[in-house]
Amino acid sequence: MNLRQFISSILLLALTSTTANAQFSFDSYALQNVNIIDVNTNNILYDYTIVVTKNKIYDILPSKKYKANDTIQSFILKEKFVVPGLIDAHVHFATDPTEERRDNAEKILKEMLLTGITSVRDMAGDSRALSSLSRNALVGDIVAPNIYYSSLMAGTKFFSDKRTIATAQGGVSGKMPYMKAIDDNSNIELEVAQAKGTGAQGIKLYASLTKEQVRKIVAEAKKQAIPVWSHGSLIPALPSEVITSGVISISHSVMLIDEKYQKREDIPANWKGASAKEMSAEFWDKEYSKLELDILFKLMKQHDVVLDATLSVYEQYKNSENGHWRFEMAKRITRDANKMGIKVAAGSDSDQATFIQHEMKLLINESGFTPFQAIISATKHSAQASGILDTEGTIELGKKANFLFLNSNPIENINNIDDIFLVIKNGKLYNKK
C-alpha cells in the first residue's frame, strides 16, 4: 500500500465512523469510481472521477482516464451514486426570531445539511437574523447549508399580518429595508436599493400588488441586478400578469387558480364541505379541467418561469373537510406543468417540519414525476428558481463542490435518496452515521 492508498483508507474509515458527524477540508482531492446522476443529460455516468480544487469542481472524467498521484488525496467510492447537493427552494427560518430560536435554527440547519441539503432559499424573514445565519454558514462557523434569503415587498394592506409585525420587531412593519410596503407613491428605485443592501439575494413579492407595481419593481430590480421571486398570484395582479412581468420563479401551484377564481368566495361550493374520502379522483379531474390552465403553462414556458410547487404545504389539507381541494388542485397543476415542460422546483415550505426529500416523494407519488425528474427539481430547477444556477445545482466544471453521495441508486427507488454515505458542501466533507 503506497502513501496515497494508506491516507485514503484512513480517511474513509473516519468518514464511516459512528461519530455524529465528521468534517474534513483539503485544497484538492479526487472522488474516484463514482456513478454520477447527470441532471443535464438525464443519464447515469458510470465509473467517473470528480476532481475538486479550492472548493470547486476542477475536472470530471472517466475513471480509467484519471491518473492518480500522491499530491491529490483520493477517495475510492466504488458503487456509490452522486447527485448534486439538494436545494430546498422554499424555507422560512426567521419569521419570528424571538420564537424561532437561534439554537434551534442551527440544530435544524445542521440536520438538513447532513441529509444532503447543501443550499436553501429563505422566502421571507427577518434579514437581521438571516444575514447572520447566512454568513456563519458560508464561513463554516456553523454546520449548515448555504442560505440565500429574500427581502419582501407587498401592498400596504398586507402589513397588518401578524407575521410581518413579528418579523419587523424593533421597527415598523412595512417600513423595514427587508420588508417594504409598496403603493403608487413608492420610490421603487430606493426601495429596491435598500432591499439589495440587506444582503438579500432576491426580492420576494408576496401579496396585494397591482400589475403596474409589479412591473415597476421587476424592471428596477433588473437594473440593479437582483432577481425577483413571487407568489403565483398577487391579487389584484393575476397569475398571468405575474408570469409575464419578468420574475424568475413563482411559488405555490394552487395559486394559479386565481386566474379564474380571484376571491376565495368564488371557489365552487361543491369543492367544500364533503369528506375527502367521499370525493373521487374522477370528480377532481373534471373540476380541474374547468380551470383551463394551458394558457398559463404556455406563458410560463415562454418566459422561462420556474414553478416552486410546494406540495408539502398543501398536504396538510389532504383530509380537511373544507380545504382538501387545495391539495387536489395543487398536485394536478404540478403534474400538468411538468408534462407541459415547465421547470418545477422543489420547495418544502413546511416550516422545516419536513425536508425537501419529502417534497421529492410527493412529486413522484402525487404528481407523476419520475425519480430523475424529482432529482432535477431538487437540484437544477431549484437552483434556477433561486438565481444560483451559474454556481450550483448541477455537477459541472467550475461549479461549487456540492454533492450528495448515496449507497444506492435513487433512480431505481427515490427512497434511496435517504441512503446517505457522504455529503460535500463547498468542498468540505460531512458524514453522519
Image (cartoon, rainbow, N blue to C red):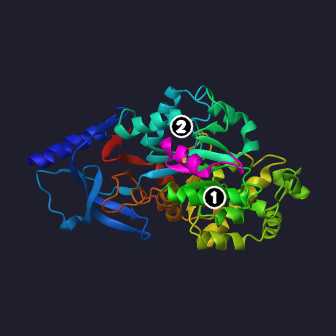
With respect to residue 15, does 236 lie above or below? below
- Give percent across and percent down for residue 150: 55, 46
Mark 2 residue element: helix
> Residue at the spot x=55%, y=45% of the render?
195
Q: In front of the other: label 1 or label 2?
A: 1
Instruction: Pick whichever, 156 or 109, lies toward us.
Output: 156
- Give percent across and percent down for residue 268: 88, 59
Which residue type does callout 1 highlight? Lys
Q: Is residue 420 left or right of residue 153?
A: left
Name the residue carrying label 1: 216
Instruction: Pick whichever, 243 or 312, lies toward us.
Output: 243
Mark 1 residue element: helix
Residue range highlighted in magenta: 182-203
> Residue at the spot x=73%, y=69% of the render?
293
Q: Which mark is residue 127?
A: 2
The quarter holding residue 432 reads top left
The quarter holding residue 176 reads top right
Which residue type does callout 2 highlight? Ser
Residue 189 is a magenta residue: yes
- Give percent across and percent down for residue 206: 67, 49
Instruction: Pick whichever, 315 or 268, lies toward us.
Output: 268
Q: Residues within 10 Å of mark 2 (few under 14, many from 20)?
A: many
Residue extending farthest left: 2
Does residue 123 appear anywhere in the picture?
no
The quarter holding residue 18 reads top left
With respect to residue 389, does 289 lie above or below? below
